[in-house]
Image (tube, rainbow, N blue to C red):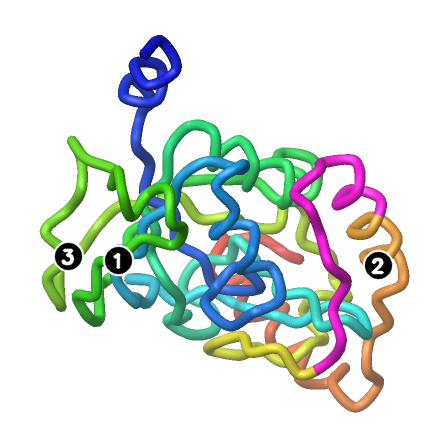
Amino acid sequence: MGAERREDQQARHLVFTYGTLKCGQPNHHILTNPKNGQATLVSTAKTFKKWPLVLVSSYEIPCLLPLEDVGYEVSGEVYLVDDRMLDTLDSLESHPDVYVRRQEDVLLLSSQPHSSNPVAEEKPLSGTAPSAEAGERLKTWIYFVRKVERKHLSLPFVPSYAQRVAYPTFTGEKEESLMFLDKEFRHVAADDSCRAEAHGRERRVADVFGQRV
C-alpha cells in the first residue's frame, strides 16, 4: 500500500524522444522495462522549431544541437513518464554532462495513447495526461547536446533517426552511458567533403546567435 501511494504521488513528465528510444529503435527497451518506471506513449510528434539533428561516430549516435532555427523540424515520439523513468532517462543520456534536458514545444502528429509496459497498462499514468489531439502544441522535455563543437557542424543534418548500424545495448546506468558517449564523442571525425558546407552552416549559425562560431 505504501509503495502504491509513493507511485501515485510521483510527478508526470512529457518527454520528446527523437533517437534510440523510439519504438523499434535500440534503446526502446528502456521505456518498456517496468523496473525503470512507467512510460505511456502519447503521440508521434515533431519539434515546433527547427533544430539540427546529427548522427555522431560510427554508431550514428543521434544528437540534437541547441541551435534554434537551423536544420529541420525533427520527428519523434512523446511519452508521459513518471519520476523514476525520468531519472532513468537522465542517466541514459548522461544529463547534464553530455546531454542537457530542457523544455521546448512540439506538435502532435497523431493520437495513439497506449502504454509502453505491461505494468502501466494495468495501472496507467493519470492526472496530467494530455488530450493528445493531432496538431496540438505541447511543451515537453527534450535532450540536447550540452556542448556544440565545430566538428558537429560538418555532419549532415537529418529530419529523423532510424537505426542503420549495430548499436550497443544499454541498461540505463549513467556510468555505462557516460563512458560510451565520452569515448565516441572524442573520436568524431569531420568529413572533408562536408567542410565547405559546414563553413556555410557556421555562418548561418553565427547569424542566428549574432556572433561568430
Q: Name the residue under label 2.
A: 184
88 is higher (above) or lower (below) than 56: above
Q: Which quadrant, please, contains the C terminus?
A: bottom right
The chief SS type of the magenta part is: loop
**In the rendering, at what x and y percent does residue 31 appear?**
48, 50
**In the rendering, at what x and y percent does residue 66 appear?**
52, 53
Dot placed on the residue nearer the N-terminal end, 2 or 3? 3
Q: Nearer the viewer, mark 2 or mark 3?
A: 3
Left or right of 192, for residue 69: left
Task: Give the label on residue 132, or none.
Answer: 3
**SS at badge 2:** helix
The residue positioned farthest toward the top in the image shown: 2
Please check the rendered image and state whether residue 178 is part of the magenta-colored stretch, yes or no: yes
Q: Crowding at label 3, few (<14), some or many (≥20) Cα neighbours within 10 Å?
A: many
**In the rendering, at what x and y percent does residue 186 appear?**
88, 56
* Tag 2: amino acid: Glu
**SS at badge 1:** strand
Between the residue at mark 2 and the residue at mark 1, the CA separation in whole angstroms equals: 34 Å
Q: Which quadrant, please, contains the N terminus?
A: top left
Q: Which residues fall within the magenta stretch?
A: 165-179
Between the residue at mark 1 and the residue at mark 3, the CA separation in whole angstroms equals: 11 Å
Q: Name the residue under label 1.
A: 114
CB within 8 Å, label 2 to label 1: no
